[in-house]
Amino acid sequence: MAGDMKKFVAIFGSAISQSVPHIYLSALPFAPRNSAVSKQYIANYRRTIRIERGGLEGWPAIQNILEGHTSTVASVAFSPDGTRIVSGSDDKTLRVWDAETAEMIAGPFEGHVHAVRSVAFSPDGTRVVSGSWDETIRVWDAETAEMVTGPFGGHSGEISSVAFSSDGTRIASGSHNGLIRVWDAETAEMIAGPFQGHTDIVISVAFSPDGTRIVSGSTDRTIRVWDARTAEMVTGPFRGHVDMIISVAFSPDGTRIISGSDDATIRIWDAGTADMVALLDEEQAGWFTSVAFSLDGTRLVFASDDKIICVRDVETAELIAGPFEGHTDEVQSVAFSPDGARVVSGSEDKTIRVWDAEIIEKTAGSFEGHSGEISSVAFSPDGTRVVSGSHDTTLRVWDARTTEMVAGPFEGHTLVVISVAFSPDGTRVVSGSEDRTLRVWDAKTAEMITGPFKGHTNWVSSVSFSPDGTRIISGSGDNKIRLWNAETAEMVAGPFNGHTHSVTSVAFSPDGERVISGSEDKTILVWNAETAEMIAGPFKGHIDAITSVAFSPDGTRIASGSRDRSILLWDAQTADVVTGPFKGHTDWISSVAFSPDGAYVVSGSDDTTIRIWDTTTSKMIVGPLKGHIKEVSSVAFSPDGTRIVSASYDKTIRVWNSQIFRRFPAYFHGQIPPVYTPSFLLDALNRRDAGSGVEKEMDHVHVHETMSPDSTPVSYTDSSTLEDGWMLGPNKELLFWTPPDVRIGLYRPSTVSIIGERLVTNLNLENFVHGESWSRCKDRIPRNTDRGRNTEVQHDARLGGRKRKASEGGSDYGQGIDAHANKRFKEVKDLEEGDFEEI
């Protein structure tokens, strides 16, 4: 239990430190169901969130995510006592964080005028040193963020690495000019150097534990050991790496040196002889970006360009912890905590993460999700399947309901798959890729049946089948459009010449006689599909590149999305704007699509949201729909208009229920009470075959909101903002906090399914109390009178699965609201007197 409690605090400390009631409201409900904490306490707290599906089974490796930097986090380090973390960033600042609560406790430290590429604590933890590409070094007070020494001048090149000596009196620095210098930490005077010998950039430097030597790694592919006082090379050069050295460090006893390189190897060397004593060649890894020893010298942590972090035994190379996955961009820096229990990492994704250094992540071997960003998605003509194309160079076909992969991966492309589409009969899939080719695949077997189609001289940005399935249109970065025979892969028309920049999007008209194209030249053109002649346009109105175009179902209008963050609706014959601009997105529009009846347009954006617009008024009727945590790359309506599919660079696909949009559009603007049991509501909406019965059931749900009579409204909607793990209400109030592993796969009220994510989590908020009512989280769940009608209430399994009848005037609840109020008064009084079980 003590061990579990330690992990409980490590995972939920940041939330608890901001709001203590969330021990019960967030931490306990989201604690792993198999944990000792959960098994001991959860049955006592009945009025909290219930995890209907998913949630954590065991303690996750990720403990905290520290957010605040606005650019790449280039360097991170623990304080000597392990309570703080310092970070340096390309945003020119340093920050000091509480390692448990994830709060910034000092900073931002401002003064550098270029990227801060290296930071370190002094041995006593009172100071921080930073090195920057502005060619200066600065020493700061770790508590006040004031500069206490510096700037140190002398280097004529960008500073890439800095380190304190073990006694804190000296600082070593490495520079892009190939030189190393040692400075007095108090006076900023150079006391040794420059150390000359490297023939290219010195990327990494470190003192030996006794402070007598300095190790350096360089892009000249060598490692050298120097006398820290005389600046003479005492060992080396160490040769063996066949690419630049990125990171070097001494072992805690000073006898060994570890190095990581762009040649995809980690090497351990004898510090005295320069002999290599161990080689770690990590399978499937690219270059190594950072390596470090644990304080006891028994383990090493490393990060590679594949965004993965691992901890291995130094002697056996056995995996001790990891692989830690979660960063969405390259990891730049890793370090152990002094006790070796945690690892901190900084990344180009602007975040810092803290990991449990003793947990081996269990990744499902049968996991079928894309390993790269998803760039394109489309429904099959019958709406039962979804095809996706990804940066991992593959396509996959999914069951839209069960989320299982039913075909794939489709392998053949050698670069990013940018665009995918089903044939009208659903038997084939076409794909366009950065490798300049198109391919046609069997949608069931994943075998290529036609292609590759060759002719474009740059990436293929957009592909689409003709309505009869016999032809394929493609747009390319070569500014051209080409029309192909879908069976023979021969070009039958084109190239269509007219655009002056890359063609970003193409589509057939519903009758197949015309082709529309959008381009980075900010224009839209309409073409005769047989002759390749331009018959309408250019359509001018956007002030930045066109990213997506689509014909309306009747072929009379065209929708366009642009990097100017707006959407326009055009007359397909006259090229006049008929509606718009549709404004609301805060970043590029990446994708637009009409609903099957032409009444609505759905849009996806780099701002991570999805919005639905009325095509007549240009008003947003739904949105912003939030759930994706990175750019939305592609959106589409299902053929029957009941669902929307969205793909994102967060590697997931979400399917949304669009029936709720049309029935309760105001709900998404917070104008009517929130949904309390999302899964129940969606089940009702999905039972469309019930006809008017669904209408009646929906009315019942909306009136009574399927909640207990004294429940507190919970404004958890599709538009709720997730910020630093907190799900926020309409007034930025804290609703609940979610662990990092849960966030990407968290269902929103209208989410039907999430494809491509290992862990999906669906919440039931029916009995959730929060805000000022939080102390009622131990209350028994009252029975629902349902306005006098007998209602059978199924208690949660934690209450023994008992079923009871509740009727107005019949049960203990039926004795009236006054009795319940008296009971509440007594329970509140008991809480005030200390009758509240503490975790």
Image (tube, grey):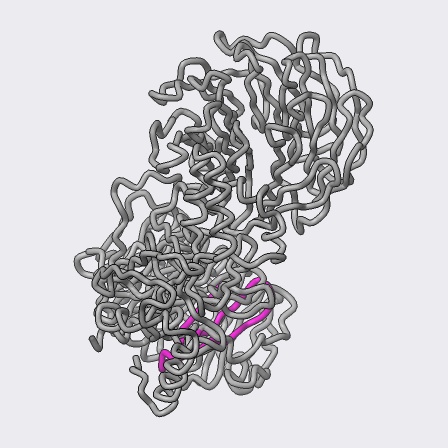
Residue 422's x, y, as percent? 48, 22
Q: For the point 43% across and 70% down, which residue is it?
A: 769
Query: Toward the viewer: 676 or 406?
Result: 676
| Residue at the (19%, 56%) spot, across then down | 318
Q: Quadrant of residue 301?
A: bottom left
In this rendering, the answer to whether 167 lies above or below 62 is below
Q: Residue at x 38, y 46 (%)?
A: 757
State which quarter of the image contains the C terminus. bottom left
- Quadrant position of the N terminus in the picture: bottom left
Which region of the structure is painted magenta?
Answer: 74-101
The answer, for residue 11, to whether it is visible in the render is no
The answer to whether residue 208 is above or below residue 240 is below
| Residue at position x 27%, y 75% in the image | 5
Q: Position of residue 173 (x, y in %)?
A: 49, 70
Dividing the picture into quadrants, the one containing residue 331 is bottom left
Residue 80 in magenta stretch: yes
Looking at the image, residue 510 sits to the left or right of residue 213; the answer is right
**Residue projecting furthest to the front:** 809
The relative height of residue 444 versus residue 641 in the rendered view (above or below) is above
Nearer to the camera, 212 or 150: 150
> Would you place residue 167 above or below residue 330 in this image?
below
Camera sees residue 540:
yes
In terms of depth relative to the viewer, which is nearer, 307 or 813? 813
Tell me if residue 611 is in the magenta stretch. Answer: no
Where does the image place residue 228, in percent across and percent down from the top left? 40, 76
Tell me residue 708's x, y (percent). 41, 64
